[in-house]
């Protein structure tokens, strides 16, 4: 689960303390439990790893991908203001990263794929350079809905 804060135009990532992706920035994610949907897993993992809540209606599906080892079903949640999560032992720190700087060497390869290939994320990153006086919430809503008016 990737969180994006409207007030600062930043994404919430966390540094992993154990494999996979030890030492790298990642989002809050994990394996599907038997009978669980990707949406249910995303909500559960966000609660377990960051002590944050989300509901199905707030989940925005992103570019899903498959590697030789995993299938990854990422979701985006837009929040109005940054919050600092209470992370569990799987992470050493939570970091809010500027949209323009999010694709960095510290980002794990799978999440980098999402940030580079997902059209919604790409448009948010591009739009983050727009003037501060623009109605950012309306702009992000247009990006998500595909409304170019």
Image (cartoon, grey):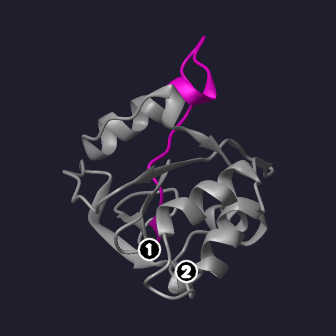
Q: Earlier in the sequence, mark 2 or mark 1?
A: 1
Residue pictured at 41% horizontal, 72% vertical:
23
Q: Residue furthest top?
A: 35
68 horizontally vs 8: left or right: right
Residue pictured at 39% horizontal, 34% vertical:
54
As for residue 121 lying within the magenta part, the answer is no
Residue pictured at 49% horizontal, 45% vertical:
29
Secondary structure, mark 1, is loop
82 horizontally vs 108: left or right: left
- The residue beneath circle 2 is 128
Q: Are marks 2 and 1 in contact (CB under 8 Å)?
A: yes
| Above or below, comparing residue 24 to residue 34 in the picture | below
Q: Nearer the viewer, residue 22 or 93?
A: 93
The quadrant in which residue 9 appears is: bottom left
**Residue 11 x/y as whole percent:** 45, 67
- The residue beneath circle 1 is 9
Answer whether residue 118 is visible to the viewer in this image.
Answer: no
Secondary structure, mark 2, is loop
Numbered label tally? 2
| Above or below, comparing residue 129 to residue 88 in the picture | below
Which mark, residue 135? none
Residue pictured at 66% horizontal, 53% vertical:
144
Q: CA distance from mark 2 to mark 1?
A: 6 Å
| The C terminus sits in image quarter | bottom right
Q: Label 2 crowding class (10 Å Cα cut-off): few <14, some 14-19, many 20+? A: many
Which segment is the magenta one? 24-40
Q: Nearer the viewer, residue 100 or 109?
A: 100
**Residue 103 x/y as whole percent:** 60, 80
Answer whether residue 108 is visible to the viewer in this image.
Answer: yes
């Amino acid at each position: 689960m990737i969180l994006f804060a409207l007030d600062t135009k930043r994404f919430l990532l966390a540094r992993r303390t154990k494999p996979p992706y030890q030492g790298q920035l990642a989002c809050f994610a994990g394996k599907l439990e038997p009978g669980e949907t990707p949406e249910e897993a995303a909500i559960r993992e966000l609660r377990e790893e960051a002590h944050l809540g989300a509901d199905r209606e707030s989940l925005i599906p992103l570019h899903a991908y498959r590697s030789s080892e995993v299938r990854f079903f990422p979701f985006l949640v837009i929040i109005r203001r940054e919050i600092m999560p209470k992370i569990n032992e799987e992470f050493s720190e939570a970091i809010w990263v500027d949209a323009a700087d999010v694709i960095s060497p510290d980002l794990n390869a799978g999440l980098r794929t999402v940030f580079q290939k997902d059209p919604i994320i790409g448009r948010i990153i591009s739009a983050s350079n727009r003037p501060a006086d623009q109605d950012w919430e309306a702009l992000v809503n247009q990006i998500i809905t595909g409304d170019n008016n």
